[in-house]
Image (cartoon, grey):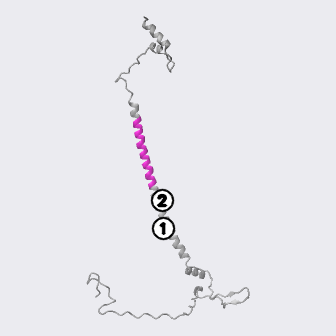
Amino acid sequence: MSSPSSLRTARAAAAPARPGGVRPAATGRARLALAPRFPRWGRRAPRMPFVVLVSVIAVSGIVGLLLFNTSMQQAAFTATQLEDRAADLSARSEELALALEDLRDPQRIAEQACRAGMVMGPTAAFLDVDTGRVIGVPEPAVRGACGLTAPTPAPPTRPAPPAPAPAAQPRGVDVASPLRFGAGRGVAR
């Protein structure tokens, strides 16, 4: 019989190569060594850098929130100031619109024109360019009380409707006296 070591060598030579290219004989001869064991409770990672990191993150978060809150308060204050200013400007705009409307009043314009020496003409006359005829009766403007002459009213074309007859009063009711609420449930005296 053959010795066990010669059998191993013969099998290793006859065995095909493994996919990684390592022969079984080579794996049998490789020596395994134990890695040094770290003690289970012996050496720990230092805690101080982790504590500092967490503290820096927490403090920066709090400072960031405070800055954000401050900026939001400033924005709200600015918005309130702008709304107040918009309300003031709106009131001023309305006041100016009323003043402009007062300045555009025809009566006021006529008074200012009178003070400036302008005179209002009584009637207008028109000139027909095609025929050369004057339509209407031209009259010279006469300075009246401050240049304003009261226009003569046109006569009414239709008669005014008759005035309505007075309504009949029921007996015992004084129309001129005010109603007394609460006394007699709204019944007049």
Number of marks: 2
Closer to the camera in the image, 137 or 145: 137
State how far apart marks 2 and 1 are (Cα).
14 Å
Image quarter of residue 119: bottom right
Give the residues drawn in magenta, as a range. 53-76
Relative image position of residue 17 (x, y in whole percent): 50, 17
Q: Where residue 7 sits in the image (x, y, percent)?
A: 45, 9
Q: Which residue is drawn at 39% across and 37% down?
A: 55
10 Å crowding of disc 1: few (<14), some (14-19), many (20+): few
**Residue under the image location 54 percent in, 73 percent down:** 100
Q: Is residue 158 magenta?
A: no
Mark 2 element type: helix
State whether residue 133 is above or below residue 73: below
Q: Quadrant of the C terminus?
A: bottom left
Residue 76: x, y in percent?
A: 44, 55
Residue bearing the label numbered 2: 82
Which residue is situated farthest in the top direction here?
1
Residue sitting at x 44%, y 8%: 5
**What amino acid type should be assigned to the residue bearing mark 1?**
Ala
Helix or strand or loop: what does disc 1 sit on? helix
Q: In the figure, 170 relative to 53: above or below?
A: below
Which residue occupies the foreground of this view, 6 or 126? 6
Residue nearer the viewer, 90 or 33? 33
Nearer to us in this view, 11 or 177: 11
Main SS class of the magenta portion in the image: helix
Q: Which of marks 2 and 1 is nearer the N terminus?
A: 2
Q: Name the residue under label 1.
A: 91
